[in-house]
Image: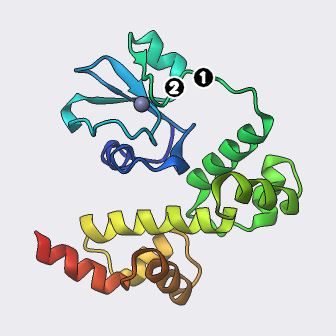
Amino acid sequence: MVYTNFSFNEMVKIANSCDESYDGLFYYAVKTTGIFCRPSCKSRNPNKENITFFQTAEEAKGAGFRPCKRCQPDMIHFDPIMDIINDTKLYIQRHYTENLTMKQIAQKIGISPYYLGRIFKKHTSRTPRSYLEKIRVSKAVHLLKNTDLSTMDICFEVGFQSYSSFYHAFQKQLEYSPQQYRKIFNYDL
Ligand SMILES: [Zn+2]
């Protein structure tokens, strides 16, 4: 059972993109090989039909899967810093639609905004703010592809407070405007 805000298809996409910003939030297992991995693992991309997800390494092991030798998903590091970072990611994932401030996030995590910003940047090479934007833009992409909502509706749906901040974050990450992105995607169909 996975408690993140991601749908099955989104988690498949994350696993296939080997994106390490989701490590610690869930694990994926491949039924045909009996092996489970972290989202960032660079092993061969599994077929969607063979993939299953777990919240923790223990659950994956409990279901009979073996840890991958490459990404070592069962290696537990007793690292309070990584706990803070994972808690922050999870908090942002669960609350990205809200008007979040860094102060508010830091307060929930229980440390100062300055310290949170510093350790988050050191371990993920991005600030909590840019992580939040990344989550929002990836949700917006999902909505652009799968719904008829206007780009304006999508902007507010994913938590941006103004169209210009949505536009800039989107353009910065994908090098297209939301409208261009939707058009290009529809051509591909
Ligand atoms: Zn692996």
Q: Which mark is residue 72?
A: 2
**Mark 1 near ligand 1 (CB under 8 Å)?**
no
Residue 152 quadrant: bottom left
Q: CA distance from mark 2 to mark 1?
A: 6 Å
Secondary structure state at the residue bearing disc 1: loop
Instruction: Check residue 75 in the rendering and tell me which mark sits there, or answer none.
Output: 1
**Residue located 25% across and 73% down the image:** 148
Residue at 33% over, 42% down: 8
* Residue 23 percent across, percent down from the top left: 54, 41
Q: Residue at x 55, y 21 (%)?
A: 74
**Quadrant of ligand 1 in image:** top left
Tell me whether the residue at label 2 lies in contact with that at label 1, contact meaning CB atoms closer than 8 angstroms.
yes
| Quadrant of residue 184 within the rendered picture | bottom left
Question: Residue 22, labelled with which disc?
Answer: none
Looking at the picture, which amino acid does disc 1 mark? Met
Q: Residue furthest bottom?
A: 164
Horizontal side of 152 relative to 156 (left or right) equals left
Q: Is residue 49 above or below residue 122?
A: above
Left/right placement of residue 55 relative to residue 84 reads left
Front in this rendered view, residue 20 or 63: 20
